Image (spheres, grey):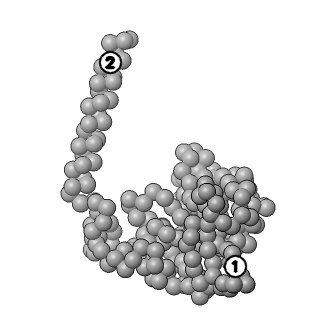
């Protein structure tokens, strides 16, 4: 999904970059964190307005480079993108890139200079994340999940501001350990044991349901 998203923006000459937990995953090994199912990206307010005017509710087809995977994605732009304050918090996501097959999506948030006269060069989203222009630009070209992507210029500062320095140091987190040889986060023994127990419990429950259904049939 993220490959299709990044390819679409690049092919259409639109700026976007990975953010938040997705950016943290990139920092470690150029991939998403295995426990983070929330993919986050950001765009400028100009790009956000362009998406709303030209691509809202449009369907885009994607075929993988090997030709084995095809998908359709919907761009859904929030009608409240012109309102750049948090409000009640129900509209902090400005747009989404949605897989129409299963409903999975990428969150897209826009950054704006909300107070250009009093705070020039300070960009923010509706969820109180603030960045200076020289922290964002010039963007760095990189690879994420096997495709070209962009990340903010001062990504280290952005990550430590949001998650603290520990996020770039700790090698044990959320039931995973960082494997330096594999350059990947791998599940620890407790996590694998818990997942095995959950799988066995589900299989047992499915058997019970099948037996009950057989009695009714």
**141 displayed left or right of 12:** left
Dot 1: within a 10 Å radius of its alpha carbon, few (fewer than 14), some, or many (20 or more) residues?
few
Is any part of residue 157 visible from this angle?
yes
Can you identify the residue that label 2 sits on?
212
Could you tell me how far apart the alpha carbons at marks 2 and 1 are, in whole angstroms?
A: 63 Å
Q: Residue 107: which quarter of the image?
A: bottom right
Front label number (2 vs 1):
1
In the foreground, 148 or 89: 89
Query: Split into 4 quadrants, where in the image is the N terminus?
Result: bottom right
Q: Residue at x 70, y 71 (%)?
A: 45
- Label 1 SS: loop
**Vertical comparison of 97 with 6: above or below:** above
Q: Residue at x 20, y 57 (%)?
A: 189
Is there CB contact under 8 Å for labels 2 and 1? no
Q: Residue at x 28, y 72 (%)?
A: 171
Which badge, 2 or 1, comes first in the chain's sequence?
1
- Label 2 SS: helix
Residue 26 image offset from top left, x and y in percent: 45, 72
Can you identify the residue that label 1 sits on?
115
Query: Split into 4 quadrants, where in the image is the C terminus?
Result: top left
Outermost residue on the bottom side: it is 134
Q: Residue 94: which quarter of the image?
A: bottom right
**215 displayed left or right of 49:** left
**Vertical comparison of 75 with 198: above or below:** below
Is any part of residue 9 visible from this angle?
no
Residue 83 image offset from top left, x and y in percent: 71, 64
Residue 41 image offset from top left, x and y in percent: 57, 67
In the foreground, 164 or 42: 164
């Amino acid at each position: 999904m993220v490959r299709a998203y990044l390819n679409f923006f690049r092919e259409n000459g639109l700026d976007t970059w990975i953010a938040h937990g997705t950016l943290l995953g990139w920092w470690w090994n150029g991939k998403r964190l295995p426990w983070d199912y929330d993919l986050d990206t950001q765009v400028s307010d100009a790009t956000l307005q362009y998406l709303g005017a030209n691509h809202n509710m449009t369907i885009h087809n994607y075929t993988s480079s090997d030709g084995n995977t095809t998908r359709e994605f919907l761009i859904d732009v929030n009608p409240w993108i012109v309102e750049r304050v948090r409000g009640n918090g129900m509209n902090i996501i400005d747009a989404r890139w949605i897989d129409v097959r299963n409903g999975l999506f990428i969150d897209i948030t826009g950054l704006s200079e909300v107070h250009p006269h009093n705070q020039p060069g300070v960009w923010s989203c509706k969820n109180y994340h603030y960045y200076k222009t020289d922290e964002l630009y010039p963007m760095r070209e990189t690879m994420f999940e096997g495709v070209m992507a962009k990340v903010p210029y001062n990504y280290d500062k952005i990550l430590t501001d949001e998650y603290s320095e520990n996020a770039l140091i700790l090698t044990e987190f959320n039931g995973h350990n960082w494997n330096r040889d594999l350059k990947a986060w791998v599940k620890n023994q407790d996590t694998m044991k818990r997942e095995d127990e959950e799988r066995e419990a589900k299989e047992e429950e499915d058997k019970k349901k099948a037996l009950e259904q057989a009695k009714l049939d």
